Image (cartoon, rainbow, N blue to C red):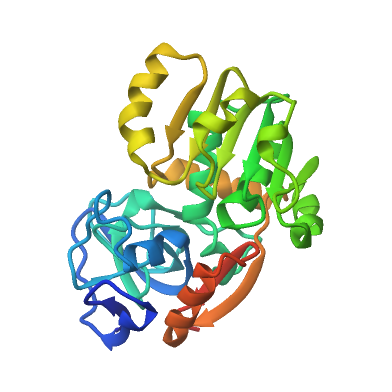
């Protein structure tokens, strides 16, 4: 099978398209013929070695966390799926990789593909959608009437976060560049902040949830815009969040947390329900063939992506 392999850390040109043996499943796995994947910032951060302290993956390896495709084989202990099912999901990126024609994965990391999405669209949803959902619902305790600020509302995780927050009935303020204002409004943002000319620290409105998708805000400088009992959630691991945060959160009413996304079948099913109910959509900024994955990484690193980047694995 064709797969993109990384043998060492470095620039995008360390990604090699080669032939590997098709994986063999165990009794608790399914084999998925992958039609599409997507590019997430965590992919190129792992490629560059930026996350070695937090997420060490044995080299050589296959990167990528999102898959959408069709089930070819089912392990004898698997109850939920049959051969031929159209599925999407998130693989464990430390044990597996999605930039490949075939992926063997645990069945509870998958769900049936949303009916209203193509494979390419569905492949853009799992990692970013799960991150947004679990951050807002599980860490932020989001509910109707909550005030939410999303820093980076026009990217992958941010665009899903806006839509999920609105699906829960919350009020959303988004932060992005003015060129993406119309897109953010289409997603449902109630108000927008131009980070190029406005400062989040000048906000007088107090928020229940501040979701820092970009990971460039210092908690000490923005905690004053959180309600008592409010929570700051970031996607970026740091010493302050991981070590000091656990101590700080014991003695302070305003909390700071790091989201570690979890593969979860029920959450994938909820995202699929949101899609089919018209509450969530995806925007594919650019689509790349698997042979052009290095180019896709370069564009993702530029920080200019609006919505998601898809990776076509097979027809």
Camera sees residue 234? yes
Q: Position of residue 63 (x, y in %)?
A: 33, 68
In the drawing, does residue 144 fall left or right of residue 44? right
Pinpoint residue 268: horizontal percent, then vertical percent.
Answer: 49, 48
Q: Residue 118: image x %, image y %?
A: 60, 69
Q: Quadrant of residue 260?
A: top left
**Residue at left 67%, top 44%?**
162
Please identify the quadrant where the N terminus is shown: bottom left
Q: Residue at x 37, y 34 (%)?
A: 240
Q: Residue 112, image x and y in percent?
A: 49, 56
Q: Nearer the viewer, residue 269 or 57?
A: 57
The correct choice, above or below, for 124 with respect to 13 in the image is: above
Question: In percent of the image, x 27 and y 48: which residue is there?
Answer: 54
- Please name whichever residue, 213 or 278, is drawn nearer the observer in this view of the structure: 213
Residue 65 in sight here: no
- Give me the residue at 51% from left, 37% from top: 218
Q: Which image quadrant for residue 250?
A: top left
Relative height, residue 58 to residue 213 (above, below): below
Instruction: Give the mark count.
Output: 0
| Residue 20 or residue 70, whichever sits in front | 20
Q: Nearer the viewer, residue 249 or 85?
A: 249
Report the side of 119 relative to 162 (left or right). Answer: left
């Amino acid at each position: 099978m064709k797969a993109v392999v990384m043998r060492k850390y470095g620039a995008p040109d360390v990604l090699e398209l080669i032939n590997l043996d098709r994986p063999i499943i165990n009794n608790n796995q399914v084999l998925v013929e992958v039609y599409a994947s997507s590019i997430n910032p965590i992919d190129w951060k792992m490629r560059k070695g930026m996350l070695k302290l937090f997420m060490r993956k044995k080299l050589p390896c296959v990167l990528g966390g999102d898959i959408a495709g069709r089930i070819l084989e089912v392990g004898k202990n698997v109850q939920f799926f049959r051969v031929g099912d159209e599925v999407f999901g998130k693989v464990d990126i430390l044990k597996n990789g999605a930039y490949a024609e075939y992926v063997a994965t645990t069945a509870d990391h998958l769900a049936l593909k949303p009916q209203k999405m193509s494979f390419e669209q569905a492949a853009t949803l799992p990692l970013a959608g799960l991150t947004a959902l679990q951050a807002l619902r599980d860490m932020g305790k989001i509910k109707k009437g909550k005030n939410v600020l999303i820093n980076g509302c026009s990217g992958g995780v941010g665009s899903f976060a806006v839509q999920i927050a609105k699906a829960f009935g919350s009020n959303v303020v988004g932060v992005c560049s003015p060129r993406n204002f119309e897109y953010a409004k289409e997603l449902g943002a109630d108000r927008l902040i131009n980070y190029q000319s406005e400062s989040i620290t000048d906000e007088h409105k107090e928020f229940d949830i501040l979701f820092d998708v970009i990971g460039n805000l210092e908690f000490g400088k923005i905690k004053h815009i959180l309600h008592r009992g409010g929570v700051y959630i970031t996607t970026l691991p740091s010493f302050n969040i991981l070590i000091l945060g656990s101590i700080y959160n014991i003695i302070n009413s305003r909390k700071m947390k790091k989201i570690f996304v979890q593969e979860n079948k029920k959450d994938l099913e909820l995202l699929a329900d949101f899609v089919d109910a018209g509450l969530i959509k995806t925007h594919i900024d650019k689509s790349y063939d698997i042979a052009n994955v290095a180019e896709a990484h370069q564009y993702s690193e530029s920080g200019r992506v609006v919505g998601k980047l898809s990776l076509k694995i097979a027809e």
